Image: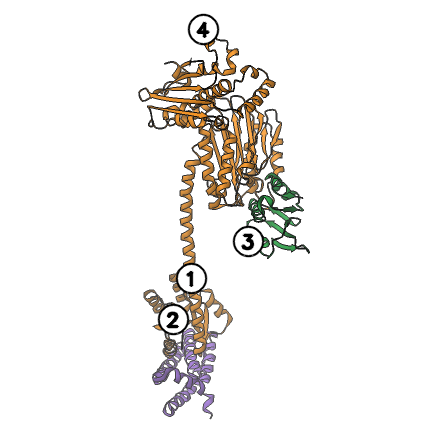
């Protein structure tokens, strides 16, 4: 008669004849029956046999049905064990109390087998549903736990990549949530080998894994290329190219990148899709750093523009950027934080220094307990004195002293490759494989750049350095350079790097650059009294300061620069002077 | 005297159908339990234990209804309510006893004929 | 959020109208709005007159539409943008990719 599966059903009824009837009906419906004659027996039988459904008389000796129901429900815990009260009670209050103690239904006397069967089946379906729900809930809970664990691991991997930089530098303040990577926000900062630093704030479309995936290559490109001496424009182009290639259509990265030049006191800004940034002046004035570009990953490489805006900035002046999560955060009343609140705080601050803390406090106050839908990232980068970086590069560079120590490498560029390719980052990269040399990456970068530019600009292109004497001449110089670069044929520049370790804590790097140009009269440089103004055009004064030996050969188209390095000892205060004093 | 008014034959035959071989056991269990409950009623009346009185009446009411002894169930209900109100009276027990005697006789007769 | 579409009488243009918030929850509906239909229209108009809010995933959806409609050859106009919507499109410099009015 029954198509439902058999259950184990507990019948607790003190009345022998009633119990006999019920037990017969239920058994005939195909279920297994356990009986009890009072509440205490019922609780005990439940504990021993864990029936799936309980039929419970209300009035029983020793322990009544309501009390037994309480115990049974407590023992059942999360499992749904339906309790049907057997009753000839009819007053509403008693019936309500049955439900209050956990009863699920009633069955009144005289027992009707059709109704009883219908109820048992209905509760069995409910029990099934409940079990399915719980299984799914447990499954989801377990999946969620696993997912959080995976996120945590992924975040650690990401941290290793993204936080190798100098976010902890004294001139950077930032707010970024610990799980920000899964909300799509990234913040990178790295010192440049030539001095100064690059900072990148990015906001990937979407949340979760898709947002995190793009962040990895972005971080690698940013840190890898910055440390190898690439320019902000080259890095942006590469990030755009990479992201456009790997991200599906519709996913992209709004971002802003800063190139902070501490030496000249300039900051270059590129903003593609982030809300306006702010340049806060020491005199209380401020300028907006507007988004001028499409986000990264939207345009194909040939249409991408890495054009930056350049600002002068004095020590103490600062740049502020935030992701749209801040402007679009909501408070409990459903209002957006908005740009106006942002600018009001900037305007009402007494000094540029206060702005960051006041903004941070305002954002905190504003959203209160409301969970932010987007992520909130705020970063402030302050123009600092150059000394800041000495400390940074020491912190980053003092890794293990393994790696190649004795090697030689020869690299030559020919014809129009000379016009298209800057070999300095590549060469610097090779040098940076010597761990000890990393501390001097800025100096080596400068030496390589100056030597290569001399070979190309003066040696091959025959550009007169005197042109660079006036600002106007500069423009002419570069125009002329562009023009001549287009017609380079049959020329080459070769660079030879030769490194020899000197013990474990020092060495010598010999850089030889030879060009196919006509050379120049270098005899003047051997004289004792150098006129530095005259030499500025070829950067030779600078080279002589950085190198331990600088010699020309042939017609002046081959130059050899010797750079000696030694690791600072614990007592020495300055790295730069250490190598010179040898 | 009409038998139907004391015993619901329809209910009884349905019970018989369900119980099959155990129908006789059920009837004898009912009769034996019921006489015990009537004894309880007497004792409770004597000792003026209103709660016990009411519980015994309630229990007898339930089994009477299930067996199809509708009138007996009604009389038990009167006694149960009286017990709850604390107004015990020998009349209530007498009424139940009288009715039970009839039901018992008729059940036995029913068993013989079916 | 509700998305409705209307085809011009000559069948050449498809107008997709977005009421309320245009964010990730609109993803499926927005895609269906332009992917369904037998003959692809020549031009698309995204009508933002009743759009209250736009997030970055909505920008992504616009890029998907642009790609579907032919990439650089696509004729997609984003019309009737109110202040906030306009601001977000401007920050992202989407006028470089779409005709915005």
Q: Nearer the viewer, residue C68 or A235?
A: C68
Q: Earlier in the sequence, mark 2 or mark 1?
A: 2
Is A524 positioned to the left or the right of A401 in the image? Answer: right
Chain purple in the figure, letter? B
Instruction: For the residues labelled 3 and 2, say whether their Cβ atoms are less than 8 Å apart.
Output: no
A191 lies above or below A577: below
Distance in Å between CA atoms under marks 1 and 4? 92 Å
Nearest the eye: A371 or A239: A239
Q: Residue A302 placed where, x, y %?
A: 54, 36
Query: Are labels 2 and 1 assigned to the same chain?
Result: yes
The residue at which mark 4 appears reads as A528
Q: CA distance from mark 1 to mark 3?
A: 29 Å
Letter of the green chain = C
Residue visible at 33% across and 27% down in the picture: A402
Q: Quick check: marks 2 and 1 in contact, CB under 8 Å?
A: no
Camera-near label (3 vs 2) is 3
User: Which residue in the structure is indicated by mark 1?
Assistant: A132
**Marks 2 and 4 belong to one chain:** yes
Quadrant position of residue A512: top left
Q: Colour of chain A?
A: orange
| Coordinates of residue A536 in the picture (x, y in percent) | 51, 14
Q: Quadrant of the C terminus of chain A?
A: top left
Q: Position of residue B62 (x, y in %)?
A: 43, 78
Which residue in the structure is indicated by mark 3?
C28
Q: Which chain is disc 3 placed on? A: C
Residue A271 versus residue B80 in the image, above or below: above
Please give the label number shown on residue A5: 2
Choose mark 4 or mark 3, whichever is in front.
4
- Image marks 2 and 4: residues in contact by CB distance under 8 Å: no
Dot 2 or dot 4, earlier in sequence: 2
Q: Chain of mark 1?
A: A
- Can you give x and y, in whole percent of width and height, for residue A564 in the image? 38, 18
């Amino acid at each position: 008669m029954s198509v439902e599966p058999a259950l184990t059903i507990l019948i607790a009824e003190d009345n022998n004849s009633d119990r006999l009837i019920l037990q017969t009906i239920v058994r005939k419906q195909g279920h297994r029956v356990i009986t009890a004659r009072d509440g205490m027996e019922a609780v005990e039988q439940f504990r021993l046999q864990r029936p799936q459904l309980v039929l419970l008389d209300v009035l029983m000796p020793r322990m009544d049905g309501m009390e037994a129901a309480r115990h049974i429900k407590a023992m059942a815990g999360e499992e749904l064990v339906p309790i049907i009260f057997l009753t000839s009670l009819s007053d509403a209050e008693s019936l309500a109390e049955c439900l209050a103690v956990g009863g699920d239904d009633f069955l009144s006397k005289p027992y009707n087998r059709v109704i009883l069967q219908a109820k048992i089946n209905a509760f069995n379906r409910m029990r099934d549903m409940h079990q399915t729900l719980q299984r799914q809930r447990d499954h989801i809970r377990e999946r969620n736990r696993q997912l959080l664990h995976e996120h945590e691991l992924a975040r650690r991997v990401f941290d290793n990549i993204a936080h190798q930089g100098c976010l902890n530098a004294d001139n950077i303040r930032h707010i970024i949530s610990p799980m920000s990577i899964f909300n799509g926000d990234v913040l990178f900062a790295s010192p440049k080998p030539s001095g100064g630093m690059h900072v990148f704030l990015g906001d990937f479309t979407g949340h979760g894994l898709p947002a995190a995936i793009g962040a990895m290559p972005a971080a690698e490109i940013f840190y890898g290329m910055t440390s190898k001496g690439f320019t902000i424009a080259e890095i942006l182009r590469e990030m755009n190219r990479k992201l456009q290639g790997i991200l599906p259509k519709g996913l992209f990265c709004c971002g802003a990148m800063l190139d902070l030049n501490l030496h000249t006191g300039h900051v270059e800004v590129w903003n593609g899709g982030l809300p306006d940034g702010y340049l806060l002046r020491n005199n209380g004035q401020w300028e907006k750093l507007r988004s001028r570009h499409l986000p990264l990953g939207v345009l194909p490489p040939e249409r991408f523009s890495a054009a930056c805006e350049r600002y002068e900035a004095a020590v103490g002046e600062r740049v502020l950027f935030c992701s749209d999560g801040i402007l679009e955060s909501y408070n409990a009343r459903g209002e957006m934080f908005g740009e106006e609140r942002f600018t009001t705080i900037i305007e009402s601050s007494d000094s540029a220094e206060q702005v960051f803390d006041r903004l941070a406090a305002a954002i905190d106050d504003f959203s209160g307990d409301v969970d932010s839908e987007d992520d909130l990232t705020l970063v402030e980068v302050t123009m600092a004195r150059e000394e800041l970086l000495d400390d940074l590069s020491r912190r980053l560079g003092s890794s293990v002293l393994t790696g190649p120590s004795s090697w030689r490498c020869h690299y030559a560029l020919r014809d129009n490759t000379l016009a298209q390719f800057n070999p300095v980052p590549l060469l610097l990269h090779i040098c940076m494989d010597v761990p000890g040399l990393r501390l001097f990456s800025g100096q080596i970068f400068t030496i390589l750049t100056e030597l290569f530019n001399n070979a190309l600009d003066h040696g091959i292109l025959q550009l007169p350095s005197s042109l660079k004497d006036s600002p106007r001449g500069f423009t002419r110089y570069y125009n002329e350079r562009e023009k001549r670069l287009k017609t380079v044929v049959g020329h080459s520049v070769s660079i030879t790097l030769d490194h020899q370790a000197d013990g474990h804590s020092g060495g010598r790097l010999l850089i030889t650059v030879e060009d196919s140009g006509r050379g120049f009269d270098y005899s003047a440089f051997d004289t004792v009294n150098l006129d530095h103004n005259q030499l500025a055009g070829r950067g030779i004064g600078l080279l002589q300061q950085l190198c331990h030996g600088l010699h020309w050969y042939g017609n002046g188209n081959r130059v050899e620069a010797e750079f000696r390095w030694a690791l600072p000892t614990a007592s020495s205060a300055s790295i730069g002077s250490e190598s010179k004093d040898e | 005297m009409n038998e139907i008014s004391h015993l619901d034959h329809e209910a009884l035959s349905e019970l018989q159908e369900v119980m099959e071989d155990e129908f006789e056991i059920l009837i004898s269990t009912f009769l034996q339990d019921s006489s015990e409950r009537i004894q309880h009623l007497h004792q409770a009346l004597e000792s003026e234990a209103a709660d016990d009185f009411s519980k015994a009446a309630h229990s007898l009411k339930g089994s009477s209804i299930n067996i199809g002894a509708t009138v007996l169930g009604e009389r038990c209900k009167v006694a149960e309510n009286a017990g709850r109100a604390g107004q015990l009276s020998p009349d209530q027990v007498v009424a139940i006893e009288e009715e039970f005697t009839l039901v018992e006789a008729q059940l036995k007769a029913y068993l013989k004929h079916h | 959020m509700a998305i409705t579409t209307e085809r011009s009488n000559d069948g050449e243009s498809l107008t997709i109208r977005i009421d309320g918030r245009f964010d990730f929850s609109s993803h499926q509906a927005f895609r269906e709005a332009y992917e369904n239909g037998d003959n692809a229209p020549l031009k698309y108009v995204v009508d933002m007159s009743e759009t209250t809010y736009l997030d970055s995933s909505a920008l992504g959806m616009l890029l998907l539409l642009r790609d579907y409609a032919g990439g650089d050859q696509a004729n997609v106009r984003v019309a009737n943008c109110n202040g906030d919507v306009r601001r977000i499109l401007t920050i992202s410099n989407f006028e470089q990719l779409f005709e915005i009015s």
